[in-house]
Image (tube, rainbow, N blue to C red):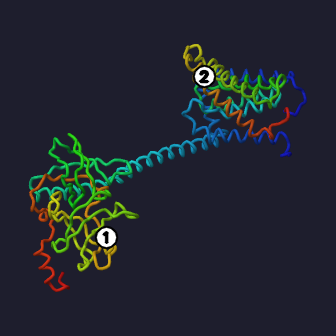
Amino acid sequence: MRLGPPRLRLVAVLLVLLGAQLALRPWMATSPFAPDFVLVALLFFAMRSRPGAGAVAGFVVGLLSDAVAPTAFGAGAFALTIIGYVAGWLKAVVFADNLLVTVVFVFAASWLRDLLELAASGALRAGAIGGELLVLWPASALGTAAAAAIALLLFRGLLRSAPAS
Amino acid sequence: MALGVERYGSRGDTIAFVACLVVALVTLSLPEALRAPIAAALRRSVLLPAVSIESRVAASRAERQAILALRAERDSFALAASQVPGLVTENAELRALLRVRRRLGTGFVTAEVLHQSGLTDGLTLLLSAGRRAGVTPLAPVVSPTGLVGMVTTVDPRTSVVMAWSHPDFRASAMTAGGKVFGIVAALRGERAGEVMEFRGVPYRDTLPAGTLLVTSGLGGVFPRGIPLGTIEGMLSEAEGWERTYLVRPAAHPAQVTHVLVLKPVAAGDSLGAAFRVPTAADSAAAAALPADTI
C-alpha cells in the first residue's frame, strides 16, 4: 500500500515523534527512563539521509534543545551534530530498517550524546558524572531505545525504503 | 539538500559537518551576555509553539495529579462515612443495653459477641465472657430487645451460646398476659434463622398478629418475662387439636454485638419489668378501653 512520496512519509513519522515529545514526555518527566523522542526522530532522519544532512539536522535540533535548557548553549548542538553525522554514515554499513541495529544504535547514540554534551559544557572535567554515566544515562538511553523500537515497529511500513536526501 | 543516490558522504557532507561543528563550538564559546539573548530569541520565535504545548501538557499533568489526590481524599472520607451508620447502631444498642442493665440491677454479666466468619455464625455465638466472669452453663443470654439464646459451653475466658435460631433450641413461651402457653423454636426450611414458630397453641385460642410472646419461666432455664418475639400470623393448624404461629423474633443473633448473660434466678422470678413487658393487668386494662383510644 503506497501512502505517498517516501519523503512525505518520513516527515509524517518525524512529526508524530515530535508530537510525542510534546504530549507524552511531560507525563514521564520524573522517570529516569523517560525517552527522548526528538533524538529518535533525528536518528530516523539521519539514518535515511546523507551524513551532511544528518549533521545539519543534528545541529539545528541541538541548538533548539539548548535554547530550551540554556545551561551550556551550544553543547547540545555540538553533540547532536556529531551524532547526526555518524548516523548518516551508518546506512553505509547497516540496514536502517533493522530493528536490532536501530535499538542498539539509538541506545549508543543517546548515551554518547549525554557524554559529548557534558564534555562540551565542561562538566566532565569537574568529575561530576560517576553514577550518572553508569546509571542515569543508561536508563534514559534504554527508554529512548525502547521508544525507537516501538516507533520502528509501528511505522515500519512508512519508513521502509525512505529516501536518502 | 537534493535527493541523492550515493551511500557515502561526499566533500559537501564533510564541509556541512565541519561547518556545523565549528558554529556549535563558536556558540559554546560565546560569552553569556551573547548566548542568553540568542536562546531567548529562539524560545520566543521557533520554539514558542512547542514551549506553549509543553507547558499546557505539564499544567494538565499537574491538574490530573491534583484530581487524583482529591479523589483519594474523597475515598478516605467516604470510607470513614460508611462506618458511621454502624457506629450509630452500635451506640444505640449499647444505650439500650445500659437501660436494661439499670432496670435489672444485679445478677448478670456483660459480654461482647465475637462474631465469626463461618456459616454457623448466628446459630451459635462466641462470647467474650467465661467462667472467670461468672458465666454458667444454661445461663440465659439476652439483648436489649429480647432473648438471644442460652449458654451451652463455658471456658475460662469465653463461652458458647446456642442462639434461638439453632435447630435444637426450645423455650417455653406464653403471651404477655399469660393467657396462652406453648413452645417456641426456630422455624426450619426456607426462612430458617429469620423467624421462629410458636407451637402447641390450643386450637380454641387464636392469637392476633402483633401479640407479644415472652418466656413463661416453666422449665427452670429461662426466667419469666423475657421477650421472644411477636406473632406474625398462623403457620399451620392440626384440625381440632393445636395451632402453630409464625413469630417475628425480638432479637436477631447475627446482629447483636453486646449481650447480658443472666445469672441463675430463683423460680418465679420475672424479668418482665426490666424489658417493660405489659403485665396481665395491663392487658386487661387495654382490653377494657374503647378500640379507638388504643
User: Badge 2, how many Cα within 10 Å: few under 14, some, many 20+?
Assistant: few
User: Badge 1, how many Cα within 10 Å: few under 14, some, many 20+?
Assistant: many
Label 1 amino acid? Leu
Residue B157 image point, x, y percent: 21, 40
Asked whether B241 or B261 is in front, the reply is B241
Write the residue at 80% across / 29% down: A96
Residue B103 image point, x, y percent: 11, 59
Q: Quadrant of residue B274?
A: bottom left
Q: Which mark is residue B31?
A: 2
Write the residue at 22% across / 41% down: B155
- Residue B220 sits above or below residue B50 on the image: below
Q: What element carries label 2?
A: loop
Q: How far separated are the C-alphas under marks 1 and 2?
A: 99 Å
Residue A65 image point, x, y percent: 64, 31
Instruction: Chain letter for mark 2, please.
Output: B
> Cβ–Cβ below 8 Å for labels 1 and 2?
no
Asked whether A66 or A157 is in front, the reply is A157
Residue A6 image point, x, y percent: 84, 40
- Residue B143 sits above or below residue B68 on the image: below
Label 2 amino acid? Pro
Write the residue at 39% across / 48% down: B76
Task: Please state if B92 lies on the left or on the right of A101 as rendered.
Answer: left
Q: In which quarter of the image is residue A117?
A: top right
